Amino acid sequence: QNIEYFKSIDSTNTFAKNIAPKSDEGMVIISDEQISGKGRVGREWISKENEGIYFSIILKPDIDIMNASFLTQVAGAAMVSSLEKMGVESTIKWPNDIIVNGKKISGILTEMSAEIDQISYIVVGIGVNLYNQSFEEEIESKATSLKKEGYDIDKKEFLQRFFLEFEDLYKEFLSGDKESTISILRKKSAVLDKEVYIIDRTGKTKVYARDIDENGNLLVEKENGSIETIFTGEISIRG
Ligand code: BTN
């Protein structure tokens, strides 16, 4: 596998996007720390050395842009399934937070570039809190690390296991089959069959999470009984 490793970098996603046009599919960028790690919706992803693992994968699938967000789901499924092989029970808070004991240990940020309807490249960026971390108070209640939850996981072992799972699920997806990923997403969901809140510009809406459809979208039942498909966004479990 083609890997580029840094001690320090601004953001593996930003770097990956810069080199993506000239890179081969499957190229991986890893860094020990990130100076300006990026989270979803413009948030910061604190990325200190010896606290977590930060990496980005460059992909060039020949797929319609409509299907691109499914790669986030492939990465999430690969994450929970590789964690399970390392003895860690985790769930996915749709669309892409990985949860251990009710708190977040990993996040995924997928970015892409496309021309007309055709994808030029997709960068899947993953951050995992592996070791002890000093979170700010506000984050402390929502985030944890594998070490804090009692799991000692080696960086290298983690990466090897993750990529084994990711490669399997990604190849299956390229062949037009999403079944294994969907089945993991359903089995390991932190939201299915629960009352959850959809958070968007208009505020919070209480819904019941019914299912994950064959494209990885969330099907929710609103209080008036109607079923709605959620394509992206933020879900809160606690209200
Ligand atoms: C989230 O908000 O949950 C997504 C966090 C994604 C963080 C990873 S760390 C590696 C890659 N590079 C970045 O700047 N962000 C992603």
Image (spheres, rainbow, N blue to C red):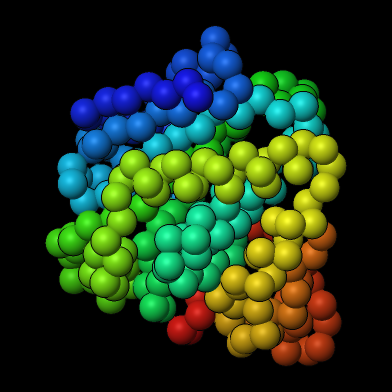
Compared with 18, 205 (above or below) is below
What is the x, y in percent for residue 114? 68, 26
| Residue 44 visible to the viewer | no
- Is 51 placed left or right of 17 in the picture? left
Compared with 228, 23 (above or below) is above
Q: Residue at x 58, y 48 (%)?
A: 165
| Residue 105 visible to the viewer | yes
Q: Residue at x 29, y 72 (%)?
A: 149
What is the x, y in percent for residue 218? 71, 67
- Is 100 placed left or right of 129 in the picture? right
- Is 186 placed left or right of 86 in the picture? right
What is the x, y in percent for residue 61? 71, 29
What is the x, y in percent for residue 90? 48, 69
Q: Quadrant of residue 232?
A: bottom right
Compared with 119, 217 (above or below) is below
Q: 24 or 109, which is in the foreground?
A: 24
Count of residue discs: 0
Q: Residue at x 41, y 78 (%)?
A: 102
Q: Quadrant of residue 212?
A: bottom right
Q: Residue furthest top?
A: 22
Compared with 234, 130 (above or below) is above
Q: 69 or 157, which is in the foreground?
A: 157
Q: Residue at x 52, y 70 (%)?
A: 91
- Is 110 placed left or right of 69 in the picture? left
